[in-house]
Image (cartoon, rainbow, N blue to C red):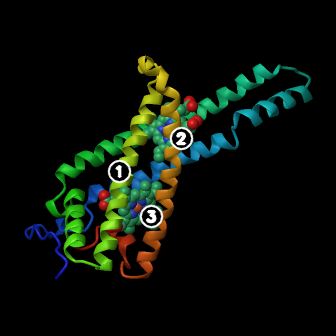
Amino acid sequence: MAIIEPVKKDLRHPAKNKKYSAPLRLWHWLNLIIISGSLITVLINATITDDHSTAILIQSDLKDSGATINADQARSAAHSLSDSVWDIHIYFGYALAALFLFRLILEFFQLADQKFISIIKSKYHNFKTIKNNRIARHEFTVKTIYALFYLLLLVMVITGLFLAFEDAMAPFKAIRHSVKQVHGFCMYLVLAFIAVHLAGVFLAERKDGAGIVSDMINGGKE
Ligand code: HEM
Ligand code: HEM
C-alpha cells in the first residue's frame, strides 16, 4: 500500500505549497537562537560566575589589594554577579515563552497539510496501516520526538515563568524547590533533544533527506 500524504494544495498560490511555511521557519531559527542564549547563560553561571569560585576570587583579590571582607560579604557580591546573569536568562525565557505562544497560535493558521497535528496523524496512519515499513516507522518516530519536545518546551516555559514570578506565586512557595528541580532537570532533556535532532538532521542530509536543512531555510517543495 502506498504511503498516504495529505494533498490539499493551494494551486492558485504555489508559493504557499512549501514543505515548511515561512512563519514556521522563522520560529525554528529564532527558537534556536533563544534556546542557545538561554543555555549559554546557564553555562556562564556554572563556570565563570559560579557563586562559590567567584566568592573565593573576590575575597582573595581584595585581600591582595589590602581590603578585607568576610566570607558572607564575598558570597553576597558573588551572588549579585550570578543574579545579573540570571536576569539575562529570564529575558531569554520571556522570549522563549513568547515564541512558544507564537508556535501554538501558528498551528491554527497553518495550511491544512502544514499543520503539525495533521502531519503526525498521517504519519501515524501510515505507520499503522503499512506493517513493517521502515520509512513509515521512522517518519512517525521523528514526529513523535518533535511532539515530545513541544511538551518539554511547555514544561520549561511553565516552570520558568513560575520561578520568574515567584513573588506572585508566593501561595505555592512549598513547591518552589521542586519546580526549580524539574526546570533544571528538563535542561538535560533539552540537551538530549538537540543532540538527537542534530544527529538526525546530519544523517538525513547524508542519506534519503538530502536538502532538508535548506528546506528549513527556503521552505522546500511539497
Ligand atoms: C530551554 C530553555 C531553558 C533552559 C535550558 C533553562 C535552564 C535553567 C537552569 C539549568 C536553571 C537553574 C536551575 C537550578 O538552579 O536548579 C534555570 C533557572 C531559572 N530559569 Fe530557566 N531555562 C530555560 C527556560 C526558561 C524560561 C522559559 C524561563 C521563564 C522566564 C526561565 C526562567 C528561569 C528562572 C527564573 C530561573 C531561576 C534563576 C535563579 O536562580 O535566580 N527559564 N533555568
Ligand atoms: C536549539 C536547537 C534546535 C531546536 C530546539 C530545534 C527544534 C526543531 C523542531 C521542534 C522541529 C520540528 C518543527 C515542526 O515540524 O513543527 C525542527 C525541525 C527541523 N530542524 Fe531543528 N532545531 C534546532 C536546531 C537545528 C539546527 C542547528 C538545524 C540545522 C543544522 C536544524 C534543522 C532542522 C530541520 C532540517 C528540520 C526539519 C526536519 C523534519 O522535517 O523532520 N535544527 N527543529
Q: In the picture provided, is 102 more to the left or to the right than 192?
A: left
Q: In the picture provided, is 126 more to the left or to the right than 188?
A: left
Q: Is residue 52 above or below residue 8?
A: above
Q: Nearer the viewer, residue 114 or 216?
A: 114
Quadrant containing the N terminus in the rendered view: bottom left
Q: Position of residue 12 (x, y in %)?
A: 7, 68
**Mark 3 or mark 2, which is nearer the start of the sequence?**
2
Q: In the picture provided, is 122 more to the left or to the right than 58?
A: left
Task: Look at the image and tell me whether residue 115 can be seen.
Answer: yes
Amino acid type at circle 1 is Tyr
- Marks 2 and 1 sit apart, C-alpha to C-alpha, by 17 Å
- Marks 1 and 3 sit apart, C-alpha to C-alpha, by 13 Å
- Marks 2 and 3 sit apart, C-alpha to C-alpha, by 20 Å
**Disc 2 versus disc 3: nearer the observer:** 2
Q: Are marks 1 and 3 in contact (CB under 8 Å)?
A: no
Amino acid type at circle 3 is His
- Secondary structure beneath dot 3 equals helix
Q: Nearer the viewer, residue 137 or 146?
A: 137
Q: Are marks 2 and 1 in contact (CB under 8 Å)?
A: no
Q: Quadrant of residue 159?
A: top left
Q: Which of the numbered marks, if any, corresponds to residue 197?
A: 3
Q: Residue furthest top?
A: 171
Q: In the picture provided, is 137 more to the left or to the right than 155?
A: left
Return the residue at label 1: 150
Return the residue at label 2: 184
- Secondary structure beneath dot 2 equals helix
Q: Quadrant of residue 100?
A: top left
**Mark 1 or mark 2, which is nearer the start of the sequence?**
1
- Secondary structure beneath dot 1 equals helix
Q: Residue at x 44, y 81 (%)?
A: 206
